[in-house]
Image: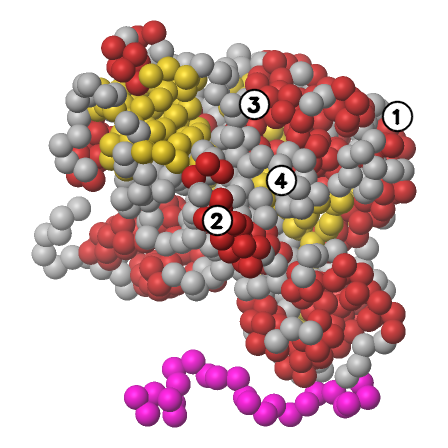
């Protein structure tokens, strides 16, 4: 038993981790506090606002080390354990430092048979890192994601928990990476319904920044 | 919340209890139109087949695992109506009833069907010796607080 | 049941062909929010529920439960007890991508549906739980919602009546389990999304212990259509026991994947034709009719099968979310099942042992078979494992993980046996 406590099967979190941020950095500004108060007002108890507050903190700090979780807990007057529990449950909250761009390539279900793994392999080769790792320059983190809900426009990926990129090909990846290098924000892509193409001659939104169409998925042999 | 509840309970005891207790409803909350005694349904099931009706009777057995079925019986006959709760397409129960309602008076709303052999075999495992003539897929069960006479 | 060819004249109602329908002014020009106006001025709440019951609408989120009946599970209104609606937009079932497009192209239909449901059940507020990956769509929804608030369509005293209701958008953060209704409620309450034991059912004790109803996006979007056109009109569209328009999300090895709106009860073969047939004139090998959890169908099992609860049940599958994956003859079913098993292993919340350990064990076994190191008896071990998981957990995730494993092995056993190491002695196949 004692041995089990000394050498746990699952690594326990470090009780005194080194702080990633200085005391001065670890504060919410007045606007952010106001925003959090707005979220709190939407729920009967402050607990409900935990997820929104963690999102806000992640946008501000880039990831959620324990000191940021503590900051959120203090702001909402909740126990740290609860905030820690929530933050570690969901995959989109980053518990360790990620690259500037997090590339979530979907390889699940439809994407598996429509070239998701080809895209992942191409990115692994291009960035020189394996899935689940960050490039040494700290710009890109490559991840394999579970179904992102864009199965008709497979293969696809999501960039930094934000916009989706559909119907990926190696050329498209190159263009996307070039745009990211140049610091251009990636646009929101509206995918046209096939019935709209037939009945309305194209996308129904006139305000869509970029329009994609559902296309024949590419051939692939790679399934893992 | 908890303290309010305790307060209400104390108040109820102080007032003499049962007069304020009302029916417990599980599942659909609609007011049933015509309530038919279970004896009448068992006597002439062909009249009620495949229609949504409300049947009243005394609860004899209840599923002790999940509360997903109960047996309604009339006063004078040994035959019974097996009431089981509506399920979703994936097999989950839409609602369940408490397992301690034997002997209470209940009104079940649902559709009458003939029991399927396969299903019956499962129920015989669950509660041997109960012989239903009919079964019902219930969307709601109303249970009276009083023991039936 | 739809007659063959009926679909050719079908006019879309969930996503009618109107440019910029997602703008509030366009939506209102097209008669939007008329159903809400009518309901608020002339209808009694219980009549709305009765109309939805009459329409025969079944939930579009996977379980296919009659919506009107679900609404009638809400207990009588008590003063000072708030009641809530949760709109489940945590669309994470693999193969499903319809709600995202509905929210992008017709968000006000969803808002109107939410408000109608809110009136029918006398609700205080609706939490619209959108999965965190849909961040861009959350921004779109927030924009349109604030316009609806400004137009007095949502909020206090809607359209000058006594009825008030808020719609609050909640952003998830990537957890498949949050699509399960009780775990969605836990997530909303700011906890780890561990499903709750039922009873109590959400209608008795939901979010923060108050009566709650949970409906899918597409289900709620049907409510204004039912009010505008009448429950009998809706009941007459598509399959008799499972009526209404439905968004089919077609993906996989077809020429024209995408989201298509057609009535329920469509022949699967018709839908394949609509989606342009199989790519490169290949033969169909397998079809998953409603998202990863539902049993896979072999190509020879789909003749005459229609997309509705009854017909699919007869064929040995389920309607699920109507997210259909077509796979061609070159598909490796072992690799398919390996990835599906991995998905469930990744997404198991870890609350119940049979699921937490079972999904991992399943993945390991299938990986072993896929790597060519499996034994024939592993197949029976997998089937036995399914028996040990199904119905032994708090929520249905373990069942949802077991169904595809059980049915893929049963229906494509040859594919699996060929990958296993040859047996040294006779085994029971």
The residue under label 4 is: C78
> Against B122, is C408 above or below?
below
Specify whether A59 is left or right of C272: right
Magenta range: A1-25
Q: Answer yes or no: are tags 4 and 3 on the same subunit.
A: yes
Question: Observer-nearest residue: A63 or C215?
Answer: C215
Element type where label 3 sits in the image: helix
Question: Which mark lies nearer to you, 2 or 4?
Answer: 2
Does the stretch in magenta take in C294? no
Q: Secondary structure at mark 2?
A: helix
Name the chain letter of the residue that bears numbered label 3: C
Upstream in the sequence, badge 1 or badge 3? 1
Where is mark 1, residue-wise?
Answer: C29
Residue picked out by circle 2:
B14
Residue C149 screen position, x and y as percent:
85, 43
Between discs 4 and 3, the one toward the N terminus: 3
Residue A83 in which image quadrant: bottom right
Residue at 28%, 37% (x, y): give it.
B102
Residue highlighted by disc 3? C53
**Residue at mark 1 to residue at mark 3: CA–CA distance:** 29 Å
Q: Quadrant of the C terminus of chain B?
A: top left
Residue at image location 34% in from the left, 29% down from the top? B105
Chain to which mark 2 belongs? B
Give the chain letter at badge 1. C
Q: Is residue C219 above or below residue B33?
A: below
Task: State the CA–CA distance, disc 2 to disc 4.
Answer: 23 Å
Residue sitting at 71 percent across and 71 percent down? A76
Task: Give the number of the disc on residue C264.
Answer: none
Observer able to see residue C262: no
Residue C169 at x, y = what percent? 72, 51
């Amino acid at each position: 038993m004692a041995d089990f406590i000394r050498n746990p099967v699952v690594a326990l979190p470090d009780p005194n981790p080194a702080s990633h941020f200085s005391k001065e950095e670890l504060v919410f500004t007045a606007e952010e506090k106001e925003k959090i108060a707005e979220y709190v007002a939407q729920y009967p108890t402050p607990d409900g606002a935990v997820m929104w507050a963690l999102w806000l903190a992640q946008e501000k700090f880039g990831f959620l080390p324990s000191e940021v979780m503590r900051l959120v807990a203090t702001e909402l007057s909740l126990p740290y354990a609860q905030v820690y529990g929530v933050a570690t449950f969901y995959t989109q909250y980053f518990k360790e430092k990620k690259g500037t761009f997090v590339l979530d390539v979907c390889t699940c279900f439809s994407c598996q048979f429509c070239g998701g793994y080809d895209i992942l392999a191409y990115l692994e080769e291009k960035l020189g890192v394996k899935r689940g790792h960050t490039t040494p320059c700290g710009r890109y983190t490559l991840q394999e994601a579970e179904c992102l809900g864009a199965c008709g426009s497979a293969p696809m990926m999501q960039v930094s928990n934000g916009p989706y990129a559909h119907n990926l090909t190696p050329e498209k990846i190159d263009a996307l990476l070039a745009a990211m290098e140049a610091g251009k924000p990636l646009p929101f892509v509206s995918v046209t319904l096939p019935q709209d193409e037939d009945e309305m001659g194209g996308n129904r939104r006139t305000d869509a920044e970029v329009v994609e169409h559902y296309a024949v998925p590419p051939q692939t042999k790679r399934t893992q | 919340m908890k303290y309010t509840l305790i307060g209400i309970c104390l108040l109820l005891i102080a007032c003499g209890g049962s007069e304020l207790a009302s029916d417990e409803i599980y599942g659909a909350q609609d007011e049933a139109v015509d309530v038919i005694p279970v004896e009448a349904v068992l006597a002439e099931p062909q009249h009620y087949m495949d229609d949504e009706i409300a049947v009243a009777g005394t609860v004899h057995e209840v599923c002790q695992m999940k509360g997903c079925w109960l047996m309604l019986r009339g006063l004078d006959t040994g035959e019974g109506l097996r009431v089981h709760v509506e399920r979703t397409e994936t097999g989950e129960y839409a609602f369940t009833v408490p397992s301690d309602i034997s002997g209470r008076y209940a009104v079940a709303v649902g559709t009458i069907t003939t029991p399927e052999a396969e299903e019956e075999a499962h129920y015989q495992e669950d509660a041997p010796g109960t012989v239903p003539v009919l079964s019902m897929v219930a969307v709601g069960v109303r249970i009276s607080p009083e023991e039936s006479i | 049941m739809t007659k063959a060819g009926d679909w050719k004249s079908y006019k879309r109602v969930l996503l009618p062909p109107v440019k910029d329908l997602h703008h509030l002014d366009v939506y209102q020009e097209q008669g939007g929010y008329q159903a809400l106006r009518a309901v608020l001025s002339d209808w009694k709440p219980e009549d709305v529920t009765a109309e939805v019951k009459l329409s025969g609408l079944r939930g579009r989120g996977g379980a296919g439960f009659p919506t009107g009946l679900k609404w009638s599970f809400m207990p009588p209104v008590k003063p000072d007890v708030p009641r809530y609606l949760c709109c489940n937009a945590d669309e994470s079932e693999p193969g499903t991508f319809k709600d995202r497009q509905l929210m992008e192209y017709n968000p006000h239909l969803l808002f109107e549906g939410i408000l109608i449901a809110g009136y029918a059940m006398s609700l205080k507020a609706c939490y619209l739980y959108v999965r965190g990956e849909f961040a861009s769509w959350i921004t779109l929804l927030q924009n349109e919602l604030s316009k609806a608030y400004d137009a007095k369509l949502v909020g206090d005293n809607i359209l000058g009546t006594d009825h008030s209701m808020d719609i609050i958008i909640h952003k998830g953060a990537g957890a498949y389990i949050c699509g399960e209704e009780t775990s969605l409620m836990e997530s909303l309450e700011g906890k780890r999304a561990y499903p709750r034991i039922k009873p109590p059912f959400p209608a008795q004790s939901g979010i923060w212990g108050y009566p709650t109803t949970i409906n899918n996006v597409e289900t709620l979007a049907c409510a204004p259509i039912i009010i505008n056109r009448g429950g009998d009109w809706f009941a007459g569209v598509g399959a008799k026991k499972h009526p209404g328009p439905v968004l089919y999300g077609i993906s996989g090895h077809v020429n024209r994947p995408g989201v298509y709106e057609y009535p329920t009860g469509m022949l699967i073969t018709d839908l394949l034709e609509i989606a342009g047939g199989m790519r490169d004139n290949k033969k169909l090998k397998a079809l998953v009719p409603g998202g990863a959890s539902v049993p896979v169908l072999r190509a020879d099992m789909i003749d005459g099968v229609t997309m509705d609860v009854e017909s699919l049940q007869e064929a040995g599958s389920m309607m699920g979310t109507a997210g259909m994956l077509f796979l061609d003859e070159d598909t490796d079913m072992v690799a398919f099942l390996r990835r599906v098993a991995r998905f469930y292993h990744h997404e198991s919340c870890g609350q119940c042992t049979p699921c937490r350990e079972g999904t991992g064990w399943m993945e390991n076994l299938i990986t072993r078979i896929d790597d060519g190191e499996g034994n024939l008896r592993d197949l029976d071990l997998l089937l036995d494992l399914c028996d040990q998981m199904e119905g032994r957990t708090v929520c249905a995730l373990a069942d949802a993980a077991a169904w595809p494993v059980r049915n893929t092995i049963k229906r494509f056993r040859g594919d699996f046996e060929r990958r296993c190491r040859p047996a040294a002695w006779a085994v029971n196949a």
